[in-house]
Amino acid sequence: MSRSRFTRRLPAAVAVAGLALAVAACGGESSSSSDGTTVAAADQLKPDADLSKQSLQITVWDGYTPKELPQRVKEKLKVQDMKVALHATNEEAMNKLTAQGDSGVDVAFVSGQYAQALNAQGLLEPIHPELIPNLANLYPEATQLSYDKGNKYSVPYTWGTTGICYRTDLVKSKPTSWNDLLKPPAWAEKKVTMMTTERWLALPALKSLGYSVNTDKDEEITKARELLMAQKPHLLTYDDTTFGDKLVSGEAVMVEAWDGWCPTTDPKGNIAFAVPKEGSDLWVDTMVIMKSSKNKEAAHALINYILDPAIHSWAAENINYKVPNKAAMEKVKIAKGSLLDIPPARLLDGESIIDLGAASTKYTRLSADVQAK
């Protein structure tokens, strides 16, 4: 694929190191919603605030927004300035955002379960919908994400699922089950790759065993580990970034893949994507506003600007990920074979990955064990 690669979702164990301390550090109070989610008390924001007195800093993955976005934002919103900091992984972003003191970040791009973890620590400003009228452009399904139903503290930016990406001309039978990867047939020996990021490494094994992708039960994680250890000798490699290239070259015939990175639009037309019958996930990357931000009105205005169909459609057209913005997707010219046309209803068939708090360390250990030489 022509776009640059970046590891977006390297899961890390994000321990909640004391909610009261975190809230005190950012000068606010918190309360619990009816579903038990911690929601920080909202500041009083001014819809008519003078944005020319505010500046913005965001942190985002490299290549995930247009390079000219800061200049466009300054011209459109009349803010003093907009700076962009980059993070390579969710782990890096979390280290930046949860360190003691003000990170200086106003808007952060993180995956859904990390937005959930930040909110649990009282570090996020609740979303003020009256300041983001373009929320109306979102698909209704985008307001029903399990980590943040109703978009109380996050706004979805991209979303997708995970499955099996494969060479139609090199497989002897179409893969339909995670077991096609976990127990590869003889003709696929040493021609299969798996992803290394912790929750996604475990996903195929958990789903094949009929477990939740969010299980924290030791016995279920142990069984998944055993399945992955038995698979290991039959793999080509573990690969989060170049599995599509390996398919194109023929080095691999089947790989675990995020949908947007499965090169189904390759000119030869011999690569396809399948969501296994046991089910998969629904991953979401989000935009959140930090409670510590001194530019909250400008932060809301930025999110509203990004949700403009002409702006948000850039993500689908340039990084090949679906956006949960109905008006934006209607502007996108979808190439033959592209997975951009997977409808929201099918995405919601997947199980959303949520933050597991301290239990995340179980997946860290699983990943380390499986990948150890």
Image (cartoon, rainbow, N blue to C red):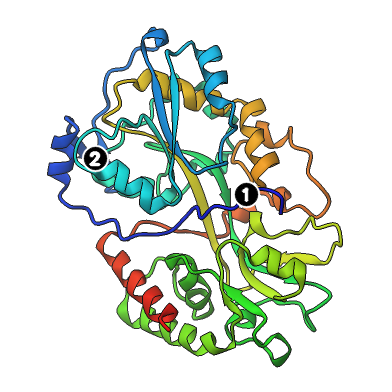
Which of 108 and 152 lies nearest the eye of the viewer?
108
Disc assigned to residue 122:
2
Name the residue: 53% across, 86% down: 231
Residue most extreme to the right: 268
Q: Quadrant of the C terminus?
A: bottom left
Question: Disc number at residue 4?
Answer: 1
- Residue 142, position in %: x, y? 53, 42
Alpha-carbon span between mark 2 and mark 1: 34 Å
**Does any portion of residue 88 appear in the rendered image?**
yes
Circle 1 residues within 10 Å: few <14, some 14–19, many ≥20: few
Which badge, 2 or 1, comes first in the chain's sequence? 1
Q: Residue at x 74, y 89 (%)?
A: 187
Tell me the element at label 2. loop
> Could you classify mark 2 by the number of other residues whose Cα lies within 10 Å: few (under 14), some (14-19), or many (20 or more)?
many
Q: Nearer the viewer, residue 128 or 172?
A: 172
Secondary structure type for disc 1: loop
Comparing labels 2 and 1, the label whose residue is closer to the camera: 1
